[in-house]
Amino acid sequence: MPRLVLASTSPYRRELLARLRLPFAAARPDVDESPLSGEAPAALAVRLAEAKAAAVARGHGDAWVIGSDQVAELGGAPLGKPGSRERACAQLAAMAGRAVRFHTAVCLAHGDGRRLQALDTTTVRFRALSEAEIARYVEAEQPLDCAGSFKSEGLGITLFEAIESRDPTALVGLPLIATAGLLRQAGFQLP
């Protein structure tokens, strides 16, 4: 079976990929994640997933490398990871009562230049949220490193009215249905 490397230090992506029961290593991609001028959120996610996979593939010879990126989109504009309690509260307040799209791209890259890619878009419909509810949530879960300022696999699920998705793992950061399909195309044996 081919070697596999995850181009990420995200604990969320590592946990998700481990569900597929394939041995893999993890490596930090050295990629500038700044959006390009006028770049659409979905295009940004695709570009960054490929850039992360390609950056790590250059140093891993015959391995296949998984790169993934997620970009939240509110009103056509990308939302980044909040990084602070204040910005997390502001993001959640802006999303309250609205639908937000999460574009999660995955790229499987080989050092010889081969690329396999997929994009999942999940729509999250947030319920109306009070300032106090937002503050309690951010204090309880500290989602400062998460696009959209929540963890759907945890208490964040209480913030929603609905999630519309083909793949529930995409919202956590790695669309496993698409990833498994790409891995099978690359020669990995999965059930």
Image (cartoon, rainbow, N blue to C red):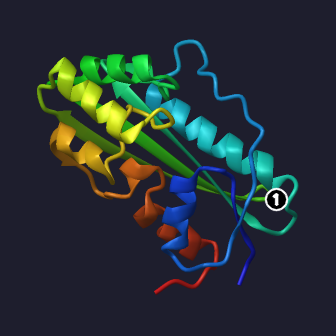
Residue 49 location in percent, x, y? 60, 44
Of residues 75 and 110, the one nearer the viewer is 75
Q: Amino acid at mark 1?
A: Gly
Relative to residue 68, is residue 24 depicted above or below? below
Q: Residue at x 55, y 80 (%)?
A: 21
In this view, 130 is above or below 15: above
Quadrant location, the N terminus? bottom right
Image position of 36 with respect to 178: above or below: above
> Where residue 67 sits in the image (x, y, percent)?
63, 51
Percent across and percent down for residue 32 are 71, 28
Which residue appears at 40% of the width and 31% of the height? 72
Residue reaching furthest top?
A: 37
Residue, x 45% and y 45% (percent of image)? 104
Residue pictured at 63% horizontal, 22% vertical: 34
Disc 1 is placed on an element classified as: loop
Tell me if mark 1 has few (under 14), some (14-19) or many (20+) residues whose alpha carbon lies within 10 angstroms of its own.
Answer: some
Q: Is residue 46 left or right of residue 140?
A: right
Residue 165 vs residue 181, the one in the foreground? 165
- The spot of residue 154 in percent (x, y) is 31, 51
Label total for image: 1
**Left or right: 144, with 127 as reference point:** right
Q: Quadrant of residue 123?
A: top left
Which residue in the structure is indicated by mark 1?
A: 111
Q: Determine whether, in the image, residue 16 is placed left or right of residue 65.
A: left
